[in-house]
Image (cartoon, rainbow, N blue to C red):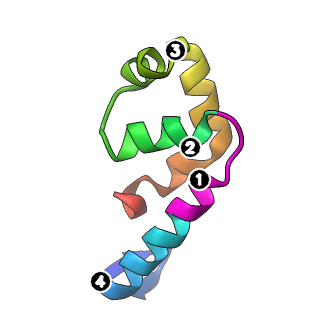
Amino acid sequence: MSVLAGVHYDNLEKEQLKGILWELVDDLPGKAPEVIRMRYQQELTLKETGEAIGINMEAACDIFKTSGCYSFHNFIL
């Protein structure tokens, strides 16, 4: 059983919530879905992510920060 923000989740619930979160990520504007998926699913650095999608590291970092997804780091992995 996992705990997130004081709430207990079993593995099935966690997987379902992860699926919902990834759907929400895919609905984000611009390059945000690419940046977030590369960061969490492919475990690329923001520099590597930027290079892969043709933007600089600072732009990738800005996209990542403004998406708010960094706060879900432990949950979506």
Distance (Cα) linking label 1 and label 3: 19 Å
- From the image, tell me which residue sits under label 3: 54
Q: Position of residue 43 (x, y in %)?
A: 30, 38
Tag 1 secondary structure: helix
Q: Which residue is mark 4?
A: 11
Image height of 62 relative to 37, above or below: above
Q: Secondary structure at mark 2?
A: helix
Q: CA distance from mark 2 to mark 1?
A: 5 Å
Amino acid at pointer 1: Asp
Q: Which residue is mark 1?
A: 26
Q: CA distance from mark 1 to mark 4?
A: 23 Å
Magenta residues, start to end:
22-30
**Horizontal and vertical percent position of residue 74:** 38, 58
Cβ atoms at labels 2 and 1 below 8 Å apart: yes
Q: Quadrant of the C terminus?
A: bottom left
Sequence-wise, the earlier of marks 3 and 4 is 4
SS for dot 3: loop
| Mark toward the start of the polypeptide (1 vs 4) | 4
The amino acid on which the numbered mark 4 sits, given as a three-letter code, is Asn
Residue linked to disc 2: 33
Q: Residue type at mark 3: give it.
A: Gly
Q: Are marks 4 and 2 in contact (CB under 8 Å)?
A: no
Give the number of the disc on residue 58: none
**In the shown orientation, is residue 12 left or right of residue 29?**
left
Q: CA distance from mark 4 to mark 2?
A: 24 Å
State the separation of the CA atoms marked 3 and 4: 36 Å
Q: Indicate whether 38 appears above or below 20.
A: above
Q: Secondary structure at mark 4?
A: helix
